[in-house]
Image: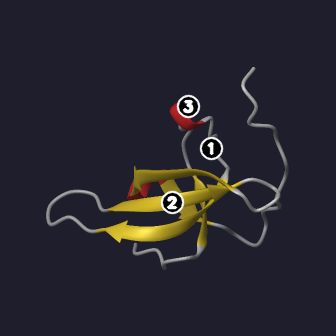
Amino acid sequence: MRYELFKEVVLTKDIPEKRLKRGDVATVVEHHPVSDGEDGYSLEIFNALGDTIAVITVPESAIELLTEDEIFSVRSVAAA
């Protein structure tokens, strides 16, 4: 599936080095096509105030579209 640029997607796996969790919402900022294998995407992740907290590149299998039966929630990303 090809995700549209600047659309919101949800992570399907944890990204511990960036303190991101499965279910976190991100914005697609770049598509990285490959000829054989899995395409990748650069994502920008924002905090609740709209500030960028991370930019990551993940394989296509690490994201999915948001659905109408999901709601947003808030969690802290402060180091424990």
Front in this rendered view, residue 48 or 3: 48
What's the amino acid at mark 1?
Arg
Residue shown at the point (52%, 31%) measured from the top left: 17
Q: Nearer the viewer, mark 1 or mark 2?
A: 2
Asked if the residue at tag 2 contacts the one at tag 1, i.e. Cβ–Cβ closer than 8 Å, the answer is no
Question: Which badge, 1 or 2, is on the more N-terminal residue?
Answer: 1
Image location (x, y in percent) of residue 56: 47, 51
What's the amino acid at mark 2?
Leu
Image location (x, y in percent) of residue 48: 81, 56
Question: Which badge, 3 or 1, is on the more N-terminal residue?
Answer: 3
Per the image, label 1 sits on a secondary structure element best described as loop
Front in this rendered view, residue 73 or 77: 77
* Residue annotated with mark 1: 22
* Residue annotated with mark 3: 16
Question: Which badge, 2 or 3, is on the more N-terminal residue?
Answer: 3
Q: Quadrant of the N terminus?
A: bottom left
As drawn, 30 above or below 23: below
Residue shown at the point (78%, 62%) measured from the top left: 70
